[in-house]
């Protein structure tokens, strides 16, 4: 059977597809008798199948041409699968320990075949809701971010290579536009897609829509998001895009990837950890007040930035005489100057991280897609009590991000609001 045009996979059709694809059938030892297939796509956009046989396993992810959770009324390009596969391969090249391997990609069918992250891997967000500590999380995620962001930037590439890569990823415009809408537009106006914990946060949502200074800063962040092709960012690096065990951290779902500001990835991750922190009181019970867990989250926030800073600058130091064209060695040719540009770069990146992280927090509280951290708190009034300080912190971070000089100051601000 030759697959010359797109059609959605069901289980029966999937078996035919695997049979016709050696890269996949080889993974299960061509054994179709004991094949177990399970559809697990709980996301908003795709079909996801886990395929397991005694000989091996993989995951099949197929992009369909509309937003699955809304239906065909909201069309969405299936080309996103191409950019996802491209990014998994490029990020996997630089951080293979933290990115699942791609076995197969079919652009016509928008199908990716990749490593199955077997149990006990779970989505990080679910682990955070359950109060599970992951001792290596900051170590791993800082590694992933430092390696992927450094090696896809002008600090490592020539401007010719960089422009070529940027041009390729400009094709992912539709998913970038979706982000522009849900992160930088909808929360700041009346939109049919917005929702919040009503009636408790009615006034808070209105305050977001009426805050001139906030809107001024959000415009600047949007401008950076749209115009600053700094590195190949994952584009959706929240705690639902990471799978974990105590020993392993795997970054999945980079279908929103594009060349954008580095702080958008770092901010997304840290912002979602901050949301998890503020949600903890809603998950506390007689047996566990979640106090020590909240301390672990704050430690993880600190370590994520500190370790990222250390690793990113170490890569920069190591390659400072390489082919990267951001700071030509002939000009930036003494240690004081190298330190000067590095410090400036990292300070700007820190402020970007806070701004984008806060924008991601706001949209999860008064925008279209919310997070399980809060949504799984059944009592609406309790939920609102957890969401409000998170929203207040986020607004303050966006407006005053340039005043913060260190991650410790950010953690102090979080503690003051809890």
Image (spheres, rainbow, N blue to C red):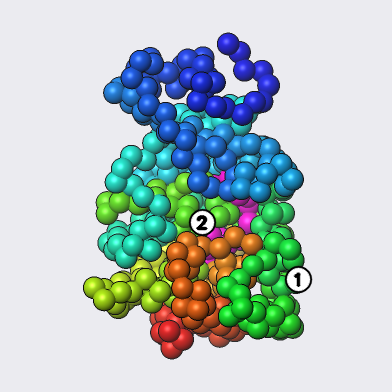
Quarter of the image where the N terminus is located: top right
Q: Dot 2 surroundings within 10 Å: few (below 14), some, or many (20 or more)?
A: many
Measured from the top left, where is residue 383 in percent x and y? 48, 74
Rendered residue at 47%/46% (across/down): 252
Measured from the top left, where is residue 42 in percent x and y? 50, 46
Residue indicated by mark 2: 237
Could one spot residue 306 in this view of the protein? no
Measured from the top left, where is residue 57 in percent x and y? 36, 29
Rendered residue at 31%/43% (across/down): 119
Picture quadrant where residue 93 is located: top left
Rendered residue at 71%/83% (across/down): 211
For residue 373, above or below residue 59: below
Residue indicated by mark 1: 190
Q: Which residues are magenta?
A: 254-268
Could one spot residue 25 in this view of the protein? yes
For residue 53, above or below residue 183: above
């Amino acid at each position: 059977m030759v697959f010359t045009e797109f059609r959605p996979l069901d289980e029966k059709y999937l078996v035919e597809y695997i049979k016709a694809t050696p890269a996949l059938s080889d993974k299960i030892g061509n054994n179709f008798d004991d094949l177990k297939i399970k559809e697990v796509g709980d996301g908003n956009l795709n079909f996801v199948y886990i395929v397991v046989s005694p000989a091996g396993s993989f995951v099949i992810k197929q992009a369909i041409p509309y937003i699955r959770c809304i239906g065909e009324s909201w069309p969405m390009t299936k080309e996103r699968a191409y950019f996802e596969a491209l990014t998994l391969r490029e990020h996997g090249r630089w951080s293979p320990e933290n990115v699942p391997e791609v076995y197969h990609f079919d652009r016509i069918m928008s199908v990716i075949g990749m490593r199955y992250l077997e149990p006990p891997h779970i989505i990080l967000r679910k682990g955070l809701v359950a109060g599970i500590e992951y001792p290596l999380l900051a170590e791993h995620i800082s590694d992933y971010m430092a390696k992927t962001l450094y090696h896809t930037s002008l600090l490592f590439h020539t401007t010719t290579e960089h422009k070529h890569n940027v041009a390729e990823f400009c094709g992912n415009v539709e998913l970038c536009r979706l982000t522009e809408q849900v992160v930088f537009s909808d929360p700041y106006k009346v939109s049919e897609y917005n929702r919040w914990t009503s009636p408790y946060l009615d006034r808070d949502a209105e305050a977001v829509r009426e805050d001139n200074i906030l809107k001024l800063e959000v415009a600047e962040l949007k401008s950076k998001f749209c115009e600053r092709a700094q590195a190949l960012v994952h584009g959706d690096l929240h705690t639902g895009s990471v799978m974990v065990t105590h020993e392993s951290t795997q970054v999945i779902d980079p279908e929103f990837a594009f060349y954008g500001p580095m702080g958008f990835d770092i901010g997304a991750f840290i912002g979602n950890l901050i949301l998890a922190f503020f949600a903890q009181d809603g998950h506390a019970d007689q047996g566990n007040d979640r106090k020590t867990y909240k301390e672990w989250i704050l430690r993880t926030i600190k370590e994520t930035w500190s370790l990222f800073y250390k690793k990113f600058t170490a890569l920069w130091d190591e390659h400072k005489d390489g082919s990267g064209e951001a700071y030509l060695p002939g000009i930036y040719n003494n240690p004081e100057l190298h330190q000067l540009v590095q410090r400036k770069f990292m300070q700007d990146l820190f402020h970007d991280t806070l701004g984008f992280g806060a924008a991601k927090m706001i949209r999860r509280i008064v925008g279209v897609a919310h997070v399980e951290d809060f949504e799984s708190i059944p009592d609406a009034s309790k939920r609102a009590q957890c969401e409000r300080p998170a929203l207040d912190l986020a607004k303050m971070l966006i407006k005053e991000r340039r005043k913060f000089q260190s991650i410790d100051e950010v953690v102090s601000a979080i503690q003051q609001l809890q």
